[in-house]
Amino acid sequence: MDWLLYPWRKTRHYFIKRSLLKSLRDEAAEEFLKILLNFMTFSFLIDRRLRKNIEGFNGLIQFKSKDNEIRVLAEFKNNKLKQKELEPNESLKVTPNATVIFKNAEALMNFLLPRGGQEGKKNRRDILRSLLRNEVILDGNFNYIYRFGYLANHLQLQLAKAFD
Amino acid sequence: MPIALDDLSLKSVTLDKLLRLKKLRDVHFKTRPAVCTELPLLMTTYMRRMDNASDSQEVRAAKRLKYVLENKKPLIQDDDLLAGTTTTKTKGMVIYPQFMGQALWPELETLPERSKNPYNITQAEIDDLNFKVFPYWMDGTIQEVCRKDYNNPTCQKIMERLVFFLGTKAHVISHTVPDYEVVIEEGLDSIIKTTTAKESTETDHKKKDFYKAVRTVLEGVIAYAQRLSKKTAAMAQRELDPVRKEELMTISKICERVPEKKPQTFHEALQAIWICHVALHQENNNIAMSLGRLDQMLYRLYSDDIKAGTLTPEKAVELVGCFFLRLVDHVPMSPETGEELFGGSGSNQAITIGGVDQNGKNAVNELTYVLLRATELLKVRDPNVNARYCPDENPPEYLVRLGEVNITTKATPCFHNDVEVIKTLLAQNYTEKDARNYSIVGCVEPVCGGKTFGHTGAIMLNLTSALEMALFQGRHRLTEEEQVGPKTAPPSEMLNFSDFLNAFETQLIFLIDQSVELNNMLGKTHLKVHPLPLLSALTKGTMDKGKDVLEGGATYNASGAAIIGLSEVVDSLCALKELVFDKQETAFAELIKAVENDWQGYERLHQKAIHSENKYGAGSREAADMTKYLLDFLHTEYQSRENYRGGKYTVGYWTMTTHAGWGVLTGAMPSGRRNREVLPSGITPVSRQAPDLMESLGFVANLDAKKIANSHALNLKYTPARDPAHMIPKFASSVEAFMKMGGLQVQFNLIDRATLKDAKAHPEKYPNLLVRVSGYTAYFGDLNKYMQEEIIIRAEYDLDTGKEVW
């Protein structure tokens, strides 16, 4: 019955895509992470080829601000991505495979989708660069972040193509 | 060792006569590197379908490598005289999934659009890596197994902040020189016979497995050679050009024989080494796997062929040229930011020429000059050519020839002083014969080729970080409020310079401890995840001990640390002592404020710091004493620590491009240095602080080489003269003088600042401009902007006046 939801998901995906682009343009970075993960979630739901990227991938990635005010969990399980917002002091039942600690929302945005990113080929996101500049700190298995980085980059390129 | 050449320069041997080399060289320069997925796909396929977890790790690694070698495509480039390729691409980037290949994952789809050093990759290759390869290895890389086994250790977390030190073992351990002599003098079947005999009599299961693993991988190498033989024979059958047909038939016969059997000709020896080198790069990262003393190893066969009339010096240059152009068929993997720390590097495979033999006598021979002519003609970044020079043994014409080649190529070879290097190795307990037989690894590091497993690039330590942490009570301005090191005393409590030095030493020892702890953890993890049976087969000592090189099987064991920022720290310590404590020009807290504000608002103090007479590389006693203190301290501390193989840590001062990358991350310093300025390279003085050439050379030459067992890179620039003939004697004299004063190593760029500036502004005018970085040679256009700037501002001396030119 999943196909019945497809039109709704497709429409929702479109609006989230618009929100994401708006947050990138307006630098409304606080909402950016939630919107990005939403966008990813719906992209996986409606795009079978994209979903292949997370087939068999079980992983838990935590994103949190240095001041612990923003905490979001991205869980890849059963070929789906789920996200969950956490309270600043909420304890985790399972240790994440990797944690991304970002200095501020802008740093996270630069880390995941760099400025100019929606224009495609300018200012590549580069995980090591963000580490080098101390904009983000990684804790845990780097390969999970690299994999997430590939997905983010892939979606960013798709966005760029869609709005070329 | 009579030299029959009429002209040591071999001027009559030109690329116009060696059209094959000209063509292959053009192909090298015109080809953009491409990602090759052959190795990771073969490894992953093997692990998914064939790996037997009940085998020992050593045997599993051996069977995996044998599978790779048995299934690797046998290829030969058009017109080449040597068969075998590192990858399936003309110029391939090798991805090692067990090391840090995944670092490339995020940028797979944008690799061709990189602003610096782009790589070609097809959609099919992206899919292979994204869907098949990288997911399989997510929890299986050395980096991540180490993290898991040691419970996410602090030392690894500190390293991953990237500004304090780098522990390279998760990525590359192959800074070594394999025993290619055994390949030339005995052939692989001799090693197989030895291991088979040992395997049948050995009762210790672990050792038995080791011998089995060695035999297995060598069978894999021979299988690869046999397939190359069949492939070239098939190509010969189809070939219409009779000359090429004959060449292919010859190559086929050679590959049928070597490296299994002992080579009988110069051509066979080069082919045997190349096949083994390719095979080693399927097991070990393609960084700094060095080749040793080629002019010594190959001389017997060269000489026999010349005497038999089957080889001429011109033909030898052609064969050596083909060999050099094989060495550049692969490039190391580097994520985009890796370009900031290691940008533009080739594979940094060193060869060593000249010097003395094991009896201390002149070892320069005719083949030395053949290798120099190939270097001069090709001007490619690999191999990194290292010339040994023994002032009282090697003939003066050899030094003159080295000068000529430097002037022609503008950047190579570099110079090592036999007298000092041998003394240094003797102090590290090498036998006299082994010390005299040293060869260079990677950038500048001396080892006994084939006998030492030294991982000379194991640690790169940013010395300015220790200074920074002493200034800010264990914190670093880049990592802000985090308490990284021990909380040492604040400036207000430091009553004299000794108090500050205590804090500095505390922080430095902390970083040394962390770097050593991590290296030892990574070493043990490497053995667990990825033992090295092939490198072990080609390292002396392992057969007697029945141990992998990672377990201490080699005759000599060591690990190398490279220190970055020496001259900057000397200048800063001297300035701090002078301004705060000796002359009391300022309060310590004020000086800290000044550097925190990048000297803004502290112009008078800034001028005093900059114009202090106590600068590294100039005639200052204070700076010389400070340098001696640092060298002693670092040498003593590192030597007192043991690596995971029971060897010692050696200290060197070469920087690759980390001095540029780390400089950009480093704030203003008490020396007067401003925020984000690049750090000086190697052991070189800060630009404009050592205006007199001889004073500068003397300063470095007077350092105790025995405390620099991992060697150093003294990087100098000489203004080229209009008439090279006018420059050569002066150039040679300056090298000779440096060595007679006790200098250890020196290397040059013979390009003036104006040319380099122009090359930066107009790269299209200077394609393939070869420059010396800090240890290795690179193409100027491949370097990041910081590194280009560092080479531009690097001290340049006019040999006529002996003064720095600005």
Image (tube, grey):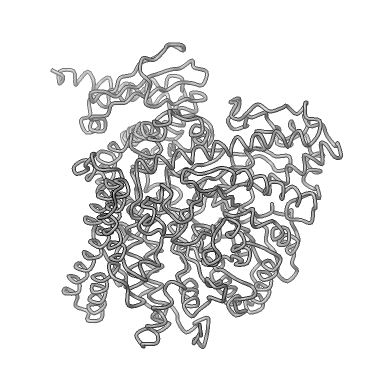
Q: Is residue B212 left or right of residue B468?
A: left
How many labels, in total?
0
Quarter location, residue B468: top right
Tell me, yes or no, if residue B444 can be seen here: no
Quadrant where the C terminus of chain B is found in the figure: bottom right
On screen, residue B88 above or below A110: below
Measuring from the top left, give residue B457's x and y in whole percent: 50, 50
On screen, residue B386 above or below A101: below
Q: Is residue B212 left or right of residue B800?
A: left
For the point 63% across and 32% down, the residue is B477
Measuring from the top left, give residue B716's x and y in whole percent: 64, 61
Q: Nearer the viewer, residue B184 or A50?
A: B184
Measuring from the top left, give residue B488's x and y in whole percent: 68, 28
Q: Nearer the viewer, residue B514 or B550?
A: B550
For the point 43% across and 63% down, the residue is B291
Q: Nearer the viewer, residue B646 or B386?
A: B646
Measuring from the top left, give residue B359's x and y in whole percent: 55, 73
